[in-house]
Image (cartoon, rainbow, N blue to C red):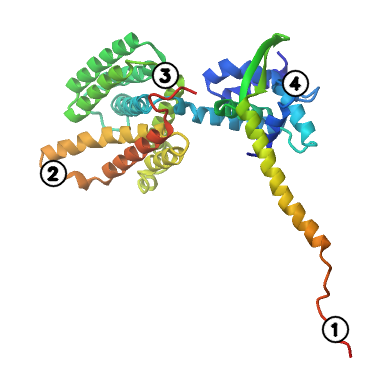
């Protein structure tokens, strides 16, 4: 394979895998013919057009699916983002209790947290990559580990473990039915979790906490702004982020209401998440394929 | 209809062509104005196929690589004719306006009154 062809194949990664399987060789053949003899790299305008074409093809993927299928995928991504953040929280608890000597030792062991966090992370991965029996097995193992971790914990409230168990059950339920799961969703989950979690970890290493404390919500706001902007092209990430926020906020509100503290309108984040969910569903209904309509 | 789309359809007037041949033919027909990038061509072909203006005519293997030929459909041909007629009409309006202006006698700005 010539260096030119290798670079062309690399550029084709901008397109979704299904599109590459169907059209990749044909586009590369045309690209090789259209590139002047002796060049080792494709022309700049070809590079630009391939990247833009690939992004357009990726953005158009959801238009061939029905609203129900798109919503199912988005909700599952939201659940996975929530579980991913849970796993990151478990890892944080482990580091705080077993590794970080600067923090006073916590009364409970961090090892159950680590096991539960790792198993939840496995569930998030297999939800997009593996067949359903693996998802069920991993979810059962993670649920057992989460319950055990809660049993060992002295400071965890039941709300977290109940939400985690509900999320694990939701993953199992949502992976049923038709396919359409793909590794691209795992990338989305990973990127959103990293964007929300890593900035909270980095300041401890790099920036004095008092500075970071001024803008504690900025990772969330960044993710929300990007998801809302991207909704013009594909509203599913917005639906996923809204689902994740609702999973964090609704149980908290229910717990508070049960304890007689505050009411639904005390938490502005809840209203924001509900508005995001409504916007995403509205856009999805416009952009998705209608049930009777032929697939493009 | 955008100019590249117009010339992609126009390139297929003489019969089905494969991707690179469409790029070359569109460049020839437009006197070098429309130089389609490969990604742009396939985005346009996808859209035109979805709209029913272009269809896949044949597939063959050339030097171990797949080569697909695309042709105009009836709808594509009609859309191309309609666009050509629209542009001809738009050009006619402007051309006749200039012709009329050229035929009118040129008046001086200021009438000089004889003494």
Q: Name the residue under label 3.
A: A180
Chain letter for mark 1, please: B
Mark 1, Cα crowd under 10 Å, few <14 / some 14-19 / many 20+, is few
Q: Name the residue under label 4.
A: A33
Chain letter for mark 4, please: A
Q: Do labels 4 and 2 share a chain?
A: yes
Q: Mark 1 points at which residue?
A: B112
Q: Is residue A25 visible?
A: yes
CA separation, marks 3 and 4?
34 Å
Question: Is A157 placed above or below A116 here?
Answer: below
Near-viewer residue (A82 or A54): A54
For the residues bearing labels 1 and 4, Cβ distance under 8 angstroms = no
Mark 4, Cα crowd under 10 Å, few <14 / some 14-19 / many 20+, is some
Question: Is B80 placed above or below A12 here?
Answer: below
CA separation, marks 2 and 3?
42 Å
Chain letter for mark 2, please: A
Disc 1 is placed on an element classified as: loop
Q: Which label is found at residue A44?
A: none
Tell me the quarter of the picture where residue A47 sits: top right
Q: Which label is found at residue A261?
A: 2
CA separation, marks 1 and 2?
94 Å
| Quarter in which the N terminus of chain B is drawn | top right
Question: Does residue B71 appear to the left or right of A226 in the view shown?
Answer: right
Chain letter for mark 3, please: A
CA separation, marks 1 and 4?
69 Å
Task: Residue at 10%, 39% (x, y): give it.
Answer: A259
Task: Residue at 23%, 22% (x, y): give it.
Answer: A165
Near-viewer residue (B25 or A223): B25
């Amino acid at each position: 394979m010539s260096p030119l062809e290798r670079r062309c194949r690399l550029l084709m990664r901008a397109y979704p895998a299904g599109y590459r399987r169907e059209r990749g060789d044909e586009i590369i053949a045309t690209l090789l013919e259209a590139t002047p003899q002796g060049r080792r790299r494709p022309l700049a305008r070809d590079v630009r057009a391939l990247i833009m074409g690939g992004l357009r093809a990726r953005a158009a993927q959801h238009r061939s699916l029905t609203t129900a299928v798109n919503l199912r995928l988005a909700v599952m991504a939201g659940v996975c983002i929530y579980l991913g953040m849970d796993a990151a929280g478990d890892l944080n608890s482990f580091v705080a209790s077993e590794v970080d000597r600067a923090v006073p030792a916590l009364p409970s062991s961090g090892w159950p947290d680590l096991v539960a966090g790792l198993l939840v992370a496995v569930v998030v991965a297999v939800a997009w990559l593996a067949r359903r029996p693996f998802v069920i097995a991993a979810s059962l193992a993670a649920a057992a580990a989460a319950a055990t971790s809660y049993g060992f914990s002295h400071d965890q409230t039941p709300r977290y473990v109940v939400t985690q168990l509900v999320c694990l059950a939701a993953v199992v339920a949502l992976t049923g039915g038709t396919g359409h799961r793909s590794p691209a969703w795992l990338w989305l989950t990973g990127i959103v979790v990293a964007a929300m979690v890593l900035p909270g970890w980095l300041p401890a290493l790099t920036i004095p906490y008092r500075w970071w404390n001024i803008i504690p919500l900025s990772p969330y706001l960044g993710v929300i702004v990007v998801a809302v902007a991207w909704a013009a092209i594909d509203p599913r990430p917005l639906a996923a982020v809204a689902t994740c926020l609702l999973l964090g906020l609704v149980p908290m509100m229910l717990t508070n209401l049960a304890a007689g503290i505050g009411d639904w309108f005390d938490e502005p984040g809840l209203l924001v998440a509900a508005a995001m969910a409504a916007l995403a569903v509205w856009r999805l209904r416009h952009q998705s394929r209608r049930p009777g309509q032929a697939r493009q | 209809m955008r100019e590249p789309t117009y010339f992609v359809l126009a390139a297929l007037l003489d019969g089905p062509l494969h991707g690179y041949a469409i790029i070359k033919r569109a460049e020839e027909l437009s006197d070098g104005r429309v130089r389609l990038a490969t990604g742009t061509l396939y985005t346009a072909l996808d859209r035109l196929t979805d709209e029913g203006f272009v269809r896949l005519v044949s597939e063959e293997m050339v030097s171990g690589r797949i080569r697909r030929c695309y042709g105009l459909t009836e709808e594509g041909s009609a859309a191309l004719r309609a666009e050509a007629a629209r542009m001809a009409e738009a050009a006619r309006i402007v051309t006749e306006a200039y012709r009329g202006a050229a035929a009118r006698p040129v008046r001086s700005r200021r009438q000089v009154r004889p003494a």
